[in-house]
Amino acid sequence: MKRKPVVIGVAGGSGSGKTSVTKSIYEQFKGHSILMIEQDYYYKDQSHLPYEERLNTNYDHPLAFDNDLLITHIKDLLTYDAIEKPVYDYKLHTRSEDVIPVEPKDVIILEGILILEDERLRNLMDMKLYVDTDADIRIIRRILRDIKERGRSIDSVIEQYVSVVRPMHNQFIEPTKRYADIIIPEGGQNHVAIDLMVTKIQTILEQNAIL
């Protein structure tokens, strides 16, 4: 049987715990060949726009992402070709000139708020997960994260959540739950669900003659 990488998509709203789920799965396969691709690295290049226009970027909208490049890179990795992952500069609100070399691996975890929104991306996945967490928990996690890690005020975080994050979640992110093979409540705290995912991934790897 021809060797083929396994692609697992992990979606969910901001603060849902999808990154914790991704890291938990990654840790389980740390001794094997595994890599993570974060959709956040694939925001569109905006260097052609004035800085003032870039400040208005809605990072929770599907059109903010360069899915064409992301799909190209996933397809390259599926044929065991190396890629150069882009880097996004949030201070300049555009793509950096830097890139991150990424070698192909046997397990690819694709993580992001809108990775299930694009049918082309979904078609590349062997397994699609959606991390489903109540809105009150997600906003609390986002407030704590943005204050601690990004130096923002609580007022600015709440204003952004109400005006952008929440409506985008309801319009674009939440509806993608219907595409998931498995819905994981409460993110990284759901150890039973994560253990089931790990077992399923191992089965797929064995079928693909990788383990």
Image (spheres, rainbow, N blue to C red):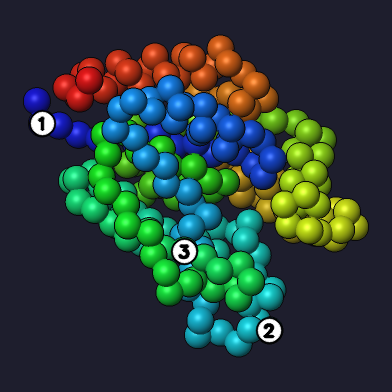
Q: Position of residue 100 (x, y in %)?
A: 38, 59
Q: Depth check: 63 or 6 in front?
A: 6
Q: Could you say which quadrant of the image residue 68 lies in?
A: bottom left
Query: Regarding mark 1 in the picture, which secondary structure is present there?
Result: loop
Contact flag, marks 1 and 2 (Cβ < 8 Å): no
Give the distance between the C-alpha atoms of the residues marked 3 and 2, in whole angstroms.
21 Å
Compared to 183, does 102 lie above or below? below
Q: Residues within 10 Å of mark 2 (few under 14, many from 20)?
A: few
Q: Earlier in the sequence, mark 3 or mark 1?
A: 1
Residue 179 visible in the snapshot:
no
Quarter in which the C terminus is drawn: top left
Where does label 1 land, which residue?
A: 2
Q: Position of residue 66 (x, y in %)?
A: 44, 63
Q: Nearer the viewer, mark 3 or mark 1?
A: 3
For residue 87, the mark is 3
Does residue 111 appear left or right of residue 77 in this picture?
A: right
What residue occupies the far left of the structure in this picture?
A: 1
Q: Could you say which quadrant of the image residue 8 lies in?
A: top left
